[in-house]
Image: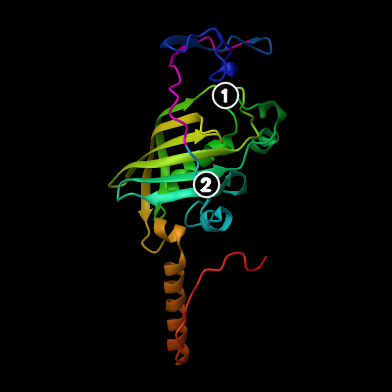
Amino acid sequence: MYPLWQLPYSLPGIHWQRRTRLWLGLSRVDGVQSCSNRSSSTVIRAVWEQPIHLPANALDIRPRTDLYRETLLFQGPRFQRIETVFALERQGDESGTTVVGMTPTDAAVGQRAFASPANQHLILGDPFLRDALLQSAALLIPQDTALPTGVRRWDIYPRPETFTESGAVYARTRLESLEDKAVQTTVRCFDPAGVVHENLDGYHLKILAHHDEYPTVEDLVCPDSRDARQLREVLCRLADRYRIEIPDIEHNLSCSIHR
């Protein structure tokens, strides 16, 4: 029996070309007999896809202000791991793709996750990074408030020798279907070489509410038109209140003017 803490990263002696039946369970922890019940799991050879190619340039989106806000990604500071957006587009009403870069894992992640030192050894890795994988789907439906309801299959592959926990990591998320209030996506987590480390197939979300006033995908990528429209509406309300005429106004986006 393999120790539970070795799974799914280290399975010595298993021939990955075939499906293998494996019994999982805990035998002893710190000398105490525990967990006599056993459960079965099926280990399947990791099917490596073609490497994912990262777009050369990132989009002019600043996640800390453009994405992490009350009306889109409402996660707290520890969970705000998306730091770059390389692609964001909708291909029709029921499909779309986004590629994001995420803050690498550091040595203190266990301390941030759990106060007790006894709980700071993370069996399956960085929980905040995994939460960011789930967050990425929200970028494809920014006018909807949605929450995850399940993942049909989540594969975590053995890390290659060249992988380092502190290395850069990315996610490509695709919208597979959107019917009524049910959203289905797939997520691929990969490294700078394009090698896939995790697959989320059948990642489902349920839409709780739709907001016409929230920005669309196009607005997130190119906010000029929406910003100009909102500015015009505010100025028109003020002009009506104070009975003044406003001049013609041209609006352009200028980034980082306060630096």
Identify the main secondary structure in magenta.
Answer: loop
Looking at the rendering, the stretch of residues picked out in magenta corresponds to 33-52
The answer to whether the residues at label 1 and label 2 have Cβ atoms under 8 Å apart is no
- Residue positioned 55% across, 43% down in the render: 101
- The earlier-in-sequence mark between 1 and 2 is 2
| Residue 247, placed above or below residue 254 | below
| Residue 107, placed above or below residue 142 | above
Residue type, numbered disc 1:
Arg
- Residue positioned 56% across, 56% down in the render: 62
**Nearer the observer, 20 or 24:** 20
Mark 1 vs mark 2: in front: 2
Asked if residue 64 shows in the view, the reply is yes
Q: From the top left corner, tell me how far across and down residue 251 is, in percent.
A: 48, 75
Instruction: Determine which quarter of the picture holds residue 19.
Output: top left
Q: Which mark is residue 100?
A: none
**Nearer the observer, 113 or 248:** 248
Residue type, numbered disc 2:
Ala
- Is-magenta flag for residue 98? no
Q: Which residue is mark 2?
A: 56
- Is-magenta flag for residue 42? yes
| Residue 107, placed above or below residue 14 | below
Q: Which residue is mark 1?
A: 159
| Residue furthest to the left | 180
Instruction: Determine which quarter of the picture holds residue 153.
Output: top left
